[in-house]
Image (cartoon, rainbow, N blue to C red):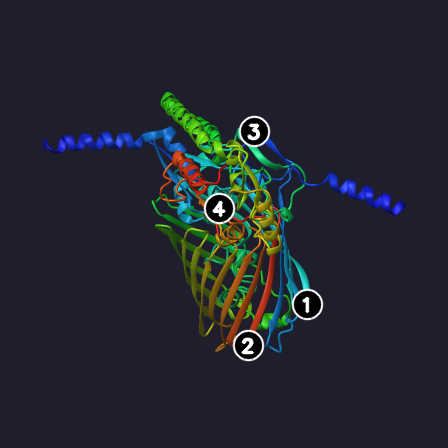
Amino acid sequence: MKKFIILFTLLISLNIFAQEFKEEKMTQQTPPPGMRGIVPNLPDISVIGDFHYKLSTDKEDNTKDKLVIEEIETSFQGYLYPDIRADVFLAMHKHDEHVEPEICEAKVSFQKLIHNLSLEVGKIHVNFGKLNKIHQHHRNFYDQPLVLTNFFGEHGLVAEGVNFSYVLPLPLFLQIDLGFWNIPLHYHDEEQQHNEFSLVNKTYTNKIWMSVPIKTSELEIGLNSLFSNGPHYQEHKDEVKIFGIDLTFRSFFTRNRKFLFTTEVYKLLRDLEDSSKERFGYFVFTNYKFNKYDSVGLRYDDAEEVVEGLRTNSLSAIYTRSLTETTALRAQYTYFFDNPKGVHQLVFQLVFGIGPHSHLLE
Amino acid sequence: MKKLIPLFICFIFINSLYSKQLYVVTTTEDLKSITEFIGKQKVKVESLSYGWQDPHSVDALPSMIVKLSKADMLVKIGLDLDMWVDGLILASRNKNITYGAVGYVDASVGITRLEVPTGKIDASMGDIHIYGNPHYWLDPENGKIIAKNILDGLCRLFPEDKEYFEKNYKEFVDELTKRIDYWKQRLKKYEGKNFVTYHKTFSYFAKRFNINIVATVEPKPGIPPSSAYLKTLVETIKKENVLCILHENFYPLKTSQSVAKQTNIKVVVLPTSVGGVKEVKDYFSLFDYIVTKIDEANENKNN
């Protein structure tokens, strides 16, 4: 009987929290991101999760056949001063068998210095190419395109420094970005250091980004260049230059239908003391969202690796089901033509968001 | 030379007219339409989204930054419907239109919101808006509050033309009052009758015209229906003697059609915004179109 009384009390108390809706007069303007915490002085706090399960014919892949928590990211966003905003993204990443904490991004944005000039300071996903600025969990595929991994490292181009951004007062959108960075050497173990490439020390980036609206479509073009030191600068004085172009075409139709085409092409020049090396890579991605919930995409990757003569290319087919604005299920099939050769891979991904986590224009 | 002088004067005159124009950017075409009624030739208005787009999920595009960077005034729906514009405002670096600035107009101020959650909310309830149902412009009485917010914004920016804007506002409100009476008359026969909608878009419309929305095709906002849910929906439609399904024209039509077929009722595909279909060119014709389509679909069923 006592058990029943406890259960009954519990049920009653649960009912107290049942959701109800009411009518209420709106007496103030709807607060924008950064001013949304219910307690007035709290920043916006969110959590993002990225889980996947991989099936693969690659016998050497030790990440297959198990559920992998790829990343848990927390974000804190708010204003420090009128027109000065702080965004901090802390993540727990999976690196092989280990989970490591990392400052994914931590930046202060001065939204308007003079005229159309703005400034970002901190650790930042550099505005270089189209995808690099977008966090992995916001992208249309589960993995990073090979060219970004092979040319910029496992996390893409993330650097500590400052970025000036200026929108020219023209009838068309034309933005110029200039970045001055310091990139710490980022390897998780010694083996990785020998096999992977990374940019280090002082790095300069610039991007000219323009956009042309065409009826209900929009074409974006980005011209990118980067000057940096290679991973063995101390021993070999290797200097790196990367030049790239990114193109994005988006078209919108009735009934929530949307077409996207995007490509990024890069050339890397690495000057050593007595020789020079060149690498080339690109990806092409096309996606069609055919209703509010579903989209299908195709991506082709081709990128030369740091080890001379080694090249990776693959073709991926992607299906995404959006459950809500912040949560999606994805299935991605990839066939690797080379390195690893003839490998079939199927990945199921769940990306979810809790809270008002949002990024600026992507 | 003599011919050139009148041409030059004409050019100066036209130029002076245009230079006095306020440039207003709105997030939706409904707000654009109302702003044009109040501002007439003293404003140039552009909408960032199209009326046929789902206003919840509009892609933020660089070209929108250019529009916002030049804007004297921004009018937004608020209540978290057009959150996609918030990042664009920052990217535009235009201090005139930031939150709280003189050129920032949130059209929802003063609206009596429906379906405001009173307890803790999360995604288990679907895409719930924490400030309540944001589709308030579909109550034409709310069009008057939207117009008042826009009027206040225009007067803040252009106080010397206050009388002009107030005159236009009064004309708009008078015309809207007349039309509301007309729409009420046309929909009187449906008062107390039951309808189903795909999403909770028509809650404000239903309240104004005293029609009942007994269920939605979505089990919860933003969540597509399961077959089990559709089974109960079919039963509800039969039990509640539902007249028709009001289907917002940017949602997938197939499910609504399937339910309608099983229950032998009609699906009325409706725009929810100006520009949603080509016949709907302004805020008045939006309601003309909705009222006409509901009436046409139920001509022989209203008794």
Q: Secondary structure under badge 1? A: loop
Seen in the image, is B172 located left or right of residue B188?
A: left
User: Mark 4 and 2 residues: CB-CB less than 8 Å, in contact?
Assistant: no
Q: Are marks 3 and 4 on the same chain?
A: no
Q: Is residue B283 above or below residue B236?
A: above
Instruction: Indicate which disc, 1 or 3, sits on the residue closer to the N terminus.
Output: 3
Q: Is residue B138 above or below residue B249?
A: above
Query: Mark 1 and mark 3: span between their CA atoms?
Result: 52 Å
Give the amino acid at mark 1. Answer: Glu
Q: Which residue is mark 4?
A: B247
Could you tell me which residue is drawn at 68 percent across and 67 percent down?
A97
In the image, residue B216 lies at what x, y percent?
A: 56, 45
Foreground mark, 3 or 2? 3
Q: Label 4: few (<14), some or many (≥20) within 10 Å?
A: many
Q: Are marks 4 and 1 on the same chain?
A: no
Instruction: Indicate which disc, 2 or 1, sits on the residue closer to the N terminus.
Output: 1
Q: Which residue is mark 1?
A: A97
Q: Which residue is mark 3?
A: A27
Q: Please tell me the numbered disc located at residue A343.
A: 2
